[in-house]
Amino acid sequence: SGWSPSPRDRQPWLQIDLKRKYRIQAIATQGTFNSYDWVTKYTLLYGDRPDSWTPYVMKGGNSTMPGNWNYHQVKRNVFHYAFTAKHIRLLPLGWNTENGGKIGVRLEVFGCAYDSYVMQMNGDDSVAFMFPGKRFRTLQDHFAVNFKTLEQDGLLLHSEGVQGDILSLELRKGRLVLTIGLGSSTVNQVDGRTTMTVGNILDDQHWHYVTIKRYGRQVNFTVDAHTETAISKGDFTYIDLDTQMYVGGVIEPNVPHLPEVPNFRGCLENVFINGINVINMKKMHYACRDILWKPMTFAGPNNYLQVPGFFRKPRMFVKFKFRSWDYTGLLMFTRFADDLGALELGLSEGQVNVTLFQPGKKKLQFAAGYRLNDGFWHTVDVAARDNLLSITIDEEEGSPLKITNPFTVRTGDRYFFGGCPKTNNTIRKCETKLNHFHGCMQQIFIDNEPVDIDIILQRRWGRYAELLLGTCGITDRCTPNPCEHEGRCIQSWDDFICLCENTGYKGEVCHMSVYKESCEAYRLTGKSWSGNYTIDPDLSGPLKPFEVYSDKAWTIVMHDRIDGIKVTGSTVDRPYIGDVNYWNASWDDVTALANTSMYCEQWIDYSCYKSRILNTPNGRPYSFWIGRNNESHEYWGGAFPESGKCGCAINQTCTDARFHCNCDADYRQWYSDKGYLMWKDHLPVRKVVVGDTNRTGSKAHISLGPLRCHGDRSIWNTISFTKPTYIEFPTFRPGSTVDISFHFKTYRPHGVFLENSDDWLRNFIRIELNTTQNLVFIFMVGDGILNVTLRSPVPLNDNEWHFVQAELNVKLARIKVDYQPWAVRRFPGQTFVTMEFTHPLLVGTSPANRTLWPFLGCLRGLRMNGVTLDLEGKANEEQGIRRNCTGQCLNATIPCRNAAQCIEGYAAYTCDCGNTAFDGFYCHKDIGAYFEIGSWLRYNIRKKPTTNEEWWANWLDPHYHNFSLGYNDTSDEIEFSFSTFQTPAVLLYISSFVQDYMAVILKKDGTLDMRYRLGLITHKYQLSFRNLADGYPHYVNITRHNRTIRTQVLWELVAVDVHTVTPLSLSLTPSEVGDIDYEIQRHNSPGLVGCISGVRYNIYAPLKTLFRPNETEPPVTVQGFVSESNCGAFPPVHGYVPWEADHWFTSIGETTYPRSLQYMLQFNVLDTSVQGCYGNAEHLSLTSDVWAGPAVPLPTSSSYWTSFEMDGCLITICGCIRNDTSGL
């Protein structure tokens, strides 16, 4: 079932007669059952008559309503304001065309019966409603009236009182103006009148619904769906009116209407005054005599109307009315008969341009009217005959525009309005360079005959395209003004733009401030010099920017009391009150500056001559000052807040120790109490009150310094999330525009920063890090779930601070990070944004929400619509929210070892061993090697010498073209540990492309020397005086800075298996150029034999590069047998990492440990000559399911697979483990 029109119908519609008037609140649609037929979008018209319609317009000015996406689901649209109607018409605008689909609709309308009492007002009549008891004095009122009219001006309601009270509702230039006054006083110069304006172009012959609600001084004024709220002027709360209220106008003897306010002409419906229906009470059941006008709406990109005319007449008369917001558009075009030319009327820059085309002649052009694109109805009357053409705008007969030129007029047989059709017919073709007209037209006359559109279309005398007949669908998109901060709105038929010049704001709706929030913010951008700056402490908030003086880090605001105040003749009961007016800033502006600053101070000096301040410590204060929130304070400069003292009492320097202020001594000489007021939450000073200068000779002089502030606590308001958790703030209520900014840093690839939603997630906003490089702004604010994604070219989870900005308004949504370009998603015209959230604002993500990634990291300086959220005030260690940006690295149970960098994970941490010679989770595991006799290792730092050009380029700019020398020529740092029995040996040798070198030598007597050659001289340093060739590990550290060298050698007797301490040799050479010095060479025979570990030269770790390579061809050369071993490892300074904390042992478990573990190991026997390793080192007995039995010989340098068991003890296998299949 359902309605499905013929596919041949060019403009199908479904019309419903409700038989009586209803108050309609919603409509639901569904496709045809079990088919591919459904409507995807439509327009809804309603009205009291079947030939006069009002289009329903959604918020944002869009009259296209969303429909269905399949045949079975119901799409319900709830109207943002209820309207009354007897007839409903649905116009399909789009439908499913896949699989042979066509228009198909089932619908339901929701509403309730509505009793309508109407009366027609002609401008010369009125209704006077007599108040019950002939008196009207109320605290609370409720007025309601419905009206429709074609007039721009008219009085709807009016009543006055003898005390200046008034309530007047009038239509003024298509706008509704409410004037309400609760009483005025000429004695106290109190003007109690308040004026409110709502709506525009209300002269459209559509019903409009007006409600006025008042309680005391608060007034809510609503027209259709637009509500304005105001607080009435004055101090009164009751309204006192005379005996009656006029409805529709004022008719009194000799006063047909109020001065300059005409009576209302049109229809009124259900006029309620505090619950009383005036029309029903007066028993006036009149019909509303609608004017039978046939408006039409030109709303499509190719719209036009073609109507017939009288052919070859020598005179032409064309008259019509139009209204539009567009600057340009074709109004009318006709081609003369006999190829005599054509006449074109077009709208251009708000004027009607008349263009007369003649064959073989230059076209004639002239313009008439001014600002005709103002949305109101305008009349165009054109008359032409041979050699004369006149045009009259808005029936101003006294000033028609006439043009006299030689031309001939013979009327054509067709007239085009609103545009030209697309056709290939060159005969009598409509040709124009103007755009199609968008707006409304009515009352078209051709040759003094009215054009009846219905008859013309019925008899097919005319044609049209993309027109809505019987209605004018014009909408005012600039009322209420969508441009913020006093931006100027300019609109077209389907869109608007905001002009933000001279407002101090920018953006599509003038929302974003062009200034920084503080001098601290300017300083962070590099502007640190002193001078005048314009700041906006609340950024996109309601406060205006203002100018301050910045003295480096200080923000200084001057005022009009800098020169001081001289006071005499004041008493406690009648004190002197000195107001402080700050320059270029309102009181709210200065308060906002103090509130966002880290520190503020203001100098105050009370100089007195027999004038007291506090009188006595417990007495009533004579003088005080008033600060923020209009709170009075009795402490003075240099004293603690609310101490009731002056600075001398704190410093114990008061003239009289019995009093807390110098001036309280009440001496006949000049004294002063002065100092800085430094309690920021009390500043700035708003007033100074002086109350003891009325005695003989008594006087005082008050000096107040400028407000001085520095810092910006909103920028540095920082927390860190160390657990999956969230912070809860009050529900965010942004209106139609939201901007969000914050700094973050994290290592996580995902995380939700913030979210706010309603109960059903039909309205929400969310910002999240979607991947390491994708920052996403997700929202659902009126038209499904949308998002805008910024794809960063660099990872954003690099644990560095990143600055995020996001904005959402009716024009677009956008997001950016740091200095990257904005990622923008633009919305179609007539979009309306609804951000009505009900849930609290969540910063972070609830762990219970398993669909969103939790954020772990730091957040700083979170602002939403200019308001800073106090993140630090929500810090809670137990919940995993820390003040400042601190994670697990700050108080790590086991810090990263060996100068490794701690990588913050906030919930955990990792250690970066990249620039160390160690590995392991904490960079605590030595990487060492066992060197047999004759073996060595070489690490090449550079393959070729550095040219002079490269050296100078690096000296001038180390980052030029990312060029690096590969080494630091001003400092060196070398560290390693070794163990050996044999001497002499060269432990380490670093050469260069010249004769410079550095070497660490183990001499024949076991002492340790260092040879350093820089230039022509070789320097010798003895690092150790004892024999280090004892088989135990020894640690060596050498640090050079310029020409200063510091060395350190540590030794310690440790439990090392003797058979593993074998000779070792290492040669570390940056190049293969240059001969080895003779002194070095003679210590290199037979070469170093032993063990070495943790070798590092600056950022280079040769052994780590060999055994843990991170590139395909590491710059390491090895000769002889070199195998990995930690036999030269020096015991760690901070102790060994507990095995339960070592991630190598995480497979053992947390609470229970197995008594028997079995592993498969491959091992090498490296040396069988050392005794003491579990008996004879040449034999090894292992218990295994595979290999059990007596001890067997293990030849040197052989590899074996076997298994062994451990029964409750940790055993050490001396050797090199090649592989570990168990994961140990």
Image (cartoon, rainbow, N blue to C red):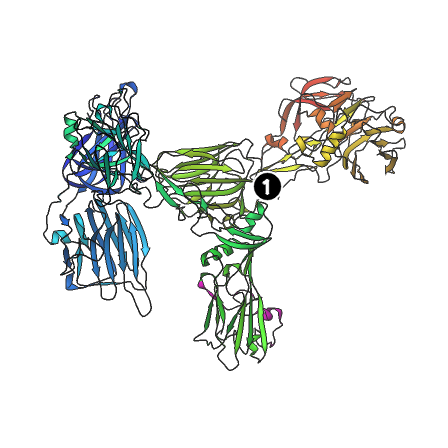
Q: Nearer the viewer, residue 749 or 238?
A: 238
Query: Which range of residues does the magenta coloring cover?
Result: 630-658
Query: Is residue 631 one of those drawn in magenta?
Result: yes
Q: Is residue 284 magenta?
A: no
Q: Considering only vertical position in the picture, is 724 above or below 243?
A: above
Q: Is residue 845 visible?
A: no
Residue 972 lies, in percent from the top left, at 77, 36
* Percent position of residue 997, x then y: 83, 31
Q: Is residue 427 left or right of residue 802?
A: left
User: Looking at the rendering, in which quadrant would you find the N terminus?
Assistant: top left
Q: Is residue 827 above or below residue 460?
A: below
Residue at the spot of label 1: 888
Residue at point 60%, 37% (across, down): 909
The residue positioned 64% from the left and 19% from the top of the image is 1185
Mark 1, other Cα within 10 Å: few <14 / some 14–19 / many ≥20: some
Q: Residue furthest bottom?
A: 696
Above-or-below relation of 1178 to 784:
above
The picture places residue 550, in percent across and down from the top left corner, at 57, 54
Q: Label 1's element?
A: loop
Q: Quadrant of residue 1058?
A: top right
Relative to 260, is 598 on the left or the right? right
* Three-letter code for the amino acid on which mark 1 is drawn: Gln
